[in-house]
Image: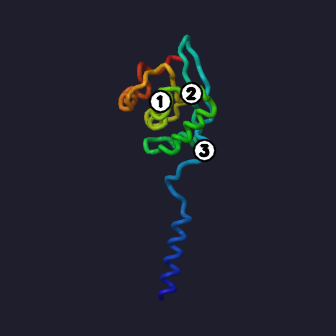
Amino acid sequence: MRRVAAAVAAGVVAAGLCAPVANATPAPPYVDHVEWAKWGDLSSLRVYPTAAGRQASGPAASTPAEAAWAEVLAQSPDADIPGMKPQFLCHWEYAELGYPGKTSWNLEPWRPEVPYQEMLEAGCNPGGTEEPF
């Protein structure tokens, strides 16, 4: 009887180890591409997330957020300036909740650096509404 119980227990453990995880983080890449846009003297970095990026993003997704930001910097090293990463993290955490499927997440170097709560209250766009271009 002990052997049967041990075999059943081993099978249950093995099944648990092999079972798919419902909330697994999708694999990168999280960013399809980025591109700079200009309107007069203003510029905006358009970040185009992949389907995996949209699925992985959200308030509790800090590890993939760092990987996604690294992808942004790999494609546009000049984005590594004050204020850009907080805007990206705000979009990463909340864009798919507020604007699901939005084509791009737009980051502007001209926006002021603000505390994160103020960033959230401004819809990730502190210092004014979303750019008109």
Horizontal side of 115 relative to 4 (left or right) equals: left
Q: Which mark is residue 87?
A: 1
Q: Amino acid at mark 1?
A: Gln
Q: Residue 3 at what x, y percent from top left?
A: 51, 86
- Under tag 3, what secondary structure? loop
Mark 3 or 1 closer to N-term?
3
Mark 2 or 1 closer to N-term?
2
The span from disc 3 to disc 1 (Cα, nearest Å) is 20 Å
Mark 2 or 3 closer to N-term?
3
- Residue at left 37%, top 29%? 115
Is residue 33 in view? yes
State the image quarter where residue 28 is shown: top right
Is residue 99 in view? no
Residue under numbered circle 3? 28
- Under tag 1, what secondary structure? helix
The span from disc 2 to disc 3 (Cα, nearest Å) is 20 Å
Q: Residue 23 at what x, y percent from top left?
A: 49, 52
- Residue at left 58%, top 37%? 70
Residue under numbered circle 2? 79
